Image: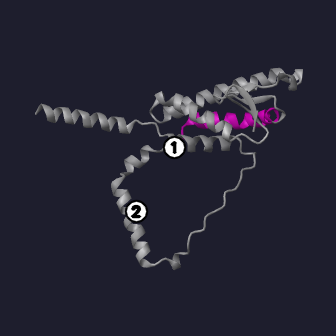
Amino acid sequence: MKKTSLLGALMLTACVTINIYFPAAAAEKVADEIIKDIQSNIPQKQQPKLELEPKSERSDMQTSFYKLIDQVINFAISPAQAAEADLSIDSPEIRQLTASMEKRFSSLQSFYAAGAIGIKADGFLAIKDAASVPLKDRNQVNKLIASENADRQALYQAIANANGHPEWVTQIKSTFAAHWISNAQSGWWYQSSGAWKQK
């Protein structure tokens, strides 16, 4: 009886652990989606579309085989488990923050292009070259950076909260940090190993 209780407790613990893992792949997808929306006036590279073989050329046997595989996958991975891999980004707070960041981006873009500001390794903005900012614009740049950094931090927390896991904020922040840099436009500056580099 004691062995059964211990086994049951271990299985319950394993189930709880499985249900609260951080969905890293989903976070990367969300980061790219949000960043591209914010920077939507930057031309995006178009990915070539894969052409699927025409339906008429598929044999009935192939179609049946694909349906069977689909059924096996759906049986093995329940819809609840599949949903765990998603990260929700639909909340009023997230929409408000991303809208604010989209509006601000047009003001930041010229400073990115001039090399005045850059993306730090932690994904936040910093002044890279104050001398390249005209004296009359320095206060504006500092305010833009402070507002952007505050919104980024709030966005990470809002995403974590929207998914019922406020403890994920550090992992979300880390994921976004890498994606702010990878989505940076050619010519922008970013920090790597403590040094500024140009994309």
86 and 186: which is toward the camera = 186
Q: Position of residue 67 (x, y in %)?
A: 40, 67
| Residue type at numbered disc 2 | Asp
SS at mark 2? helix
Badge 1 is on which residue? 25
199 and 147: which is toward the camera = 199
Q: Residue at x 41, y 76 (%)?
A: 61
92 and 22: which is toward the camera = 22
Q: Position of residue 28 (x, y in %)?
A: 56, 41
Residue 110 colored magenta? yes
Q: Residue at x 77, y 42 (%)?
A: 186
Q: Residue at x 77, y 29 (%)?
A: 117
SS at mark 1? helix
Q: Which residues are magenta?
A: 87-112
Q: Position of residue 145 (x, y in %)?
A: 73, 26
Is 182 on the left-hand or right-hand side of 30? right
How many labels were placed on the picture?
2
Badge 2 is on which residue? 70
Q: Residues within 10 Å of mark 2 (few under 14, many from 20)?
A: few
Q: Answer with mark 2 or mark 1, whichever residue precedes in sequence.
A: 1
